[in-house]
Image: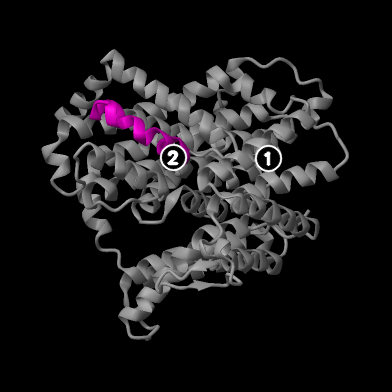
Amino acid sequence: MFFDLAQGFAALLVPQTFLYLVGGFMLGLLFGAIPGLTATLAIALLLPFTFGMEVVNALVMVMGIYMSGIYAGSITGITVNIPGAPSGAITSLDGHALMKQGHGAQALGLDAFASSIGGMIGALVLMLLAQPISELALLFRTPDKFSLVLLAVITVTIVARGSLWKAGMAMALGLMISTVGIDPMLPQGRFDFDSYHLVEGIGLLPAVIGLFAVCELLVQAATPARLTQAEAAGMPKLKRRDFVPSRATLREIGPVTYVKSSVIGVLIGMLPGGGASMASFIAYAEAKRSSRHPEKFGQGSHEGLAASEAANNAMCGGAIIPLLTMGIPGDAVTAIIFGVLLIHGLVPGPALLTENVDVIAPMFAALFVASVFVFLSVLLFGPLYIRLSRINRGVLYAFIAMISMVGVFASSFSAFQMWMALAIGAFAFALRRFGYPIVPMLMGVILGPYLEEFLRRSLIVSKGDPMIFLTSPGSAAFLALTLVFVWLLRLRPSRHELPSG
């Protein structure tokens, strides 16, 4: 195995291959940071061009896009509170709070450092433990997956700021939105009001753009212009060393937070449908549960920022494992990577890791090197990221609105989905005015299809007997963990509940 890894890193020393990695990384950074243009879209647009590439160069470039695209979703979330991707939503809570307090460079530095650590741990797990971990993933049955998704739904609801009732209502609204369209088990539409537009359902990207980009634009338009602490102080010129986390901050977070969150990210990534969003939310909830200062979460917590971002990028390594060993994509990006493999005649399966080492080893090495690039990128481009908050707000938000709508149309080729994003944004704006959190609603949209599918499949297998969720060891363990989270996070509010203001 170590020979294989050395072979993979040696392949990256070829100038052409290395340039493909750098080019892919920069492309993912651009697409991930701009709301509406995700890493998924970047790889999808690249897919036709991989026909003419050597397979190693194609896979190396895709790995660069994957790692940087997941990380970059938090950049605009921190600077202007509009995450470029769903995975950056939870990071925006503490990252933008730090930005408003005048610690934007610190927030971006911590963000990149945590992403880099998580990415490296995920890549190492992928390189060293891909085969045994894939065998472990096979032990997860459908009831286990349902209980895991239920754990994510409940923890996201109970860690939301303010009223538990309002957070529950927001989650329920998100779950309701996810049910519109074709029934996942039967070939018929539902809740479509006889509209052929709604039969296809409400896409994830329009929901994300509506809930965050459009909603935030409306909030800013309705809010009198105010200077943040940093702007009031004149925002002194930043140096690159300002983006390097201090030793005191790293000691405050602690290595346990990085390792634990990265492990959560890898494990969530291994599960079909897990994805970066679920990984970041569960890691954030666990970090809050075990924190000595849970009251800081949502108001500029270093631990919360580090936990969510470490899990985000560690998920990349975990998601590759079931793709290569079992042909099961872990998320939307790996589903497109599956297509890249097939285009070049590589069929995922147990034999792929042993028969195509010369191709797979550079792919693993590229994921690791791309995670190192993440921290280097904030040292190079960090001052440019901060300038996003200094741009004239009218010009900046007009540009974001245009790009967001173009991104929605490019993902669906549907003008109706653009109108749907606007409608969801207006609805989310009204919810925020009445104190309803938006993040649980987004998670409801993301997790709703998986929650329903795994529930119905489990009940079909058990012929309608719900006891299957208790008789399955994995499912019972996740349900028990859910109860522990509820007790720790809500039945002990004096320690864990965030203030509603």
Please, what is the three-letter code of the amino acid marked with disc 1?
Asn
Determine whether, in the image, residue 25 is placed left or right of residue 407: left
Along the viewing direction, whichever of 404 and 175 lies nearer the viewer: 404
Q: Is residue 58 visible?
A: yes
Number of marks present in the image shown: 2
Give the CA separation, mark 2 to mark 1: 20 Å
From the viewer's perspective, is the residue at label 2 or at label 1 nearer?
Answer: 1
Find residue 368 and report its horizontal and vertical position in percent.
Answer: 34, 30
What residue appears at the point 35 percent right and 34 percent down from the top-left corner?
A: 48
Give the residue number, with chain letter if any, for mark 2. 313
Residue 367, picture quadrant = top left
Label 1 neighbourhood size at 10 Å, few (<14), some (14-19), many (20+)? many
Of 32 and 169, the residue lying toward us: 32
Q: Quarter holding the N terminus? A: top left
SS of the residue at dot 2?
A: helix
Which secondary structure lies at badge 1?
loop
Residue 122 magenta = no
| Circle 2: residue type | Asn
Q: Nearer the viewer, residue 98 or 448?
A: 448
- Dot label at residue 81: 1
Does residue 419 lie above or below 142 as drawn?
above
Q: Nearer the viewer, residue 444 or 253?
A: 444
Q: Which residues are magenta?
A: 39-58
| Residue 43 drawn in magenta | yes
